[in-house]
Image (spheres, rainbow, N blue to C red):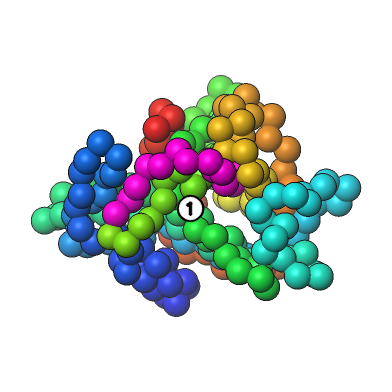
């Protein structure tokens, strides 16, 4: 658990350190990182679902497996919370890609405040460049959707992912809940720590 949290912190701390605010760039000047939730797992293709032609298919080898690292972190300055970010790293035998969150949606069990599902949308139009988080809509825009599913007791029990090379179109599919999952977790490989019901509270598209 501790090793996983440290890997999440290192990925972010080494890349997010200075505040730069312009018309095209927004980052956060922070002095503390609190890892609220972290998970890693092996993802396998869902039977009869074709993910070929996506950026993720360029990362995998013959086994078609992906290694996923997902984290939710609070960025703080002088003890005050600046923002909460989610990030996703997708790795295969031929390389990896990293993403920051664009938006998130929540589904609840009917008549309750208990999550049924949390869906997070990540894309390359919001990315890390040195010490800046840059918003850049230059095409192609690559994206990934990550779903976390929960039982009625609030226990997270599965992850699903989809990938697209058409980020703007994928964003519309995400909001219409029509992005079909392409990969699912191998439940025997999940390592997690922290509060799985946490989200980055970015329900409004940015």
- Between 187 and 49, the one lying in front of the other is 49
Q: Is residue 129 left or right of residue 152?
A: left
Helix, strand, or loop for circle 1?
A: strand
**Can residue 20 be seen from the camera position used here?**
yes
**Label 1 Cα neighbours within 10 Å, binned few <14 / some 14-19 / many ≥20:** many
Q: Is residue 110 above or below residue 161?
A: above
Q: Is residue 113 above or below residue 164?
A: above
Residue 175 % position (x, y):
57, 27
- Between 162 and 117, the one lying in front of the other is 162
Does the magenta segment cover residue 24? Answer: no
The residue at 61%/69% (across/down) is 95
Q: Is residue 164 above or below residue 109?
A: below
The residue at 65%/43% (across/down) is 164
Quarter location, residue 118 = top right
Residue 105 % position (x, y):
51, 32
- Between 181 and 168, the one lying in front of the other is 168
In the displayed orientation, state which residue is furthest to the bottom: 3
Q: Name the residue that disc number 1 marks.
A: 99
Quarter location, residue 128 = bottom left
Q: Is residue 124 left or right of residue 190?
A: left
Work out which quarter of the rendered image holds the C terminus and state it.
top left
In this picture, which residue range is highlighted in magenta?
132-146
Quarter location, residue 56 = bottom right
**Can residue 153 be seen from the camera position used here?**
no
Residue 156 % position (x, y):
58, 50
Q: Is residue 10 left or right of residue 125?
A: left
The residue at 16%/49% (across/down) is 80
Does the magenta segment cover residue 143? Answer: yes
């Amino acid at each position: 658990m501790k090793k996983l949290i440290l890997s999440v912190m290192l990925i972010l701390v080494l890349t997010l350190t200075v505040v730069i605010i312009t018309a095209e760039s927004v980052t956060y000047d922070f002095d503390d990182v609190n890892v609220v939730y972290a998970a890693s797992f092996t993802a396998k293709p869902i039977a009869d679902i074709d993910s070929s032609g996506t950026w993720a298919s360029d990362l995998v080898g013959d086994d078609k497996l992906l290694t996923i690292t997902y984290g939710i972190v609070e960025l703080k300055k002088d003890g005050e919370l600046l923002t909460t970010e989610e990030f996703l790293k997708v790795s295969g035998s031929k390389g990896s890609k990293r993403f920051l969150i664009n938006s998130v949606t929540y589904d609840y069990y009917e008549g309750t405040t208990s999550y049924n599902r949390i869906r997070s949308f990540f894309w390359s139009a919001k990315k890390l460049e040195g010490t800046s988080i840059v918003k850049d809509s230059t095409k192609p825009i690559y994206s990934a959707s990550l779903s976390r599913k929960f039982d009625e007791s609030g226990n997270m029990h599965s992850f699903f992912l989809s990938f697209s090379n058409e980020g703007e179109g994928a964003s519309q599919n995400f909001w219409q809940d029509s992005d079909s999952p392409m990969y699912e977790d191998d439940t025997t490989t999940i390592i997690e720590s922290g509060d799985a019901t946490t989200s980055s509270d970015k329900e409004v598209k940015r």
